[in-house]
């Protein structure tokens, strides 16, 4: 049984910045030598998310618009009143999308659909250095 914990480091822009981490995650799978199992991809922190989506300009724009409709930046948040950091919307967006995704690994490859990519979403209100944890379980 293989258990391997790897990381991906990202410099992000915030404000619903989406980063395609598919190739970086696949690279971690290949380096591990795992052929069958799962890749659990997780962001520590409460203003980011990991999700699957086709990484295409139109859908990126649509996703960003949806996030603005669901948790707008310009409305009052109790979090902002308490902490004064202005990123209440970021925490709500992260909670809606979730901090992790689990992808099966079959024959040494992430079992993603043809138009499905693994993305990191940075919802914070500033640029950040981010770490994504990739934990591989299998053989």
Image (spheres, rainbow, N blue to C red):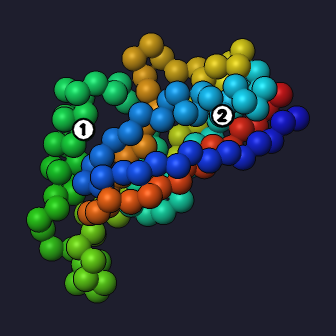
**Quadrant of residue 105 within the rendered picture:** top right
Tell me where residue 132 appears, x and y as whole percent.
54, 49
| Disc 2 element | helix
Where on the picture, by quarter, is residue 138? top right
Q: Residue at x 43, y 43 (%)?
A: 120
Q: Is residue 104 visible?
A: no
| Mark 1 Cα shell of 10 Å, populated few (<14), some (14-19), many (≥20) | some
Q: Position of residue 100 (x, y in %)?
A: 52, 46
Q: Which residue is mark 1?
A: 63
Q: Is residue 86 visible?
A: yes
Q: Pick the quarter of the image with the C terminus.
A: top right
Work out how far the residue at label 2 is from the one at label 1, CA to CA, in angstroms.
Answer: 27 Å
State if disc 1 and disc 2 touch (CB < 8 Å): no
Q: Which residue is mark 2?
A: 28
- The foreground one among 46 and 95 is 46
User: Residue 11: which numbered mark, if any?
Assistant: none
* 48 with respect to 38 (left or right): left
Percent position (x, y) of residue 36? 76, 23
Q: Position of residue 97 (x, y in %)?
A: 39, 48
For the N terminus, the quadrant is top right
Left or right, residue 110 beside residue 1: left
Tell which circle, 2 or 1, labels the residue nearer the N-terminal end. 2
Relative to 28, 99 lies left or right: left
Q: Secondary structure at mark 1?
A: helix
Report which quarter residue 41 is drawn in: top right
Q: Residue at x 16, y 42 (%)?
A: 65
Label tally? 2
* Left-right relation of 60 to 20: left
């Amino acid at each position: 049984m293989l258990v391997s914990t790897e990381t991906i480091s990202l410099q992000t822009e915030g404000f619903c910045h989406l980063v395609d981490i598919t190739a970086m995650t696949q690279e971690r799978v290949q380096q591990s030598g795992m052929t069958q199992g799962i890749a659990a991809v997780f962001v520590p922190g409460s203003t980011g998310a990991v999700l699957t989506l086709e990484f295409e300009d139109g859908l990126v724009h649509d996703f960003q618009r949806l996030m603005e409709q669901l948790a707008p930046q310009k409305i009052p948040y109790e979090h902002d009143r308490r902490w004064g950091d202005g990123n209440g919307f970021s925490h709500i967006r992260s909670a809606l999308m979730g901090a992790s995704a689990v992808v099966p690994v079959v024959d040494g490859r992430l079992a993603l659909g043809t138009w499905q990519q693994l993305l990191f979403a940075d919802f914070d209100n500033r640029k950040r250095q981010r770490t994504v944890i990739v934990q591989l379980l299998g053989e």
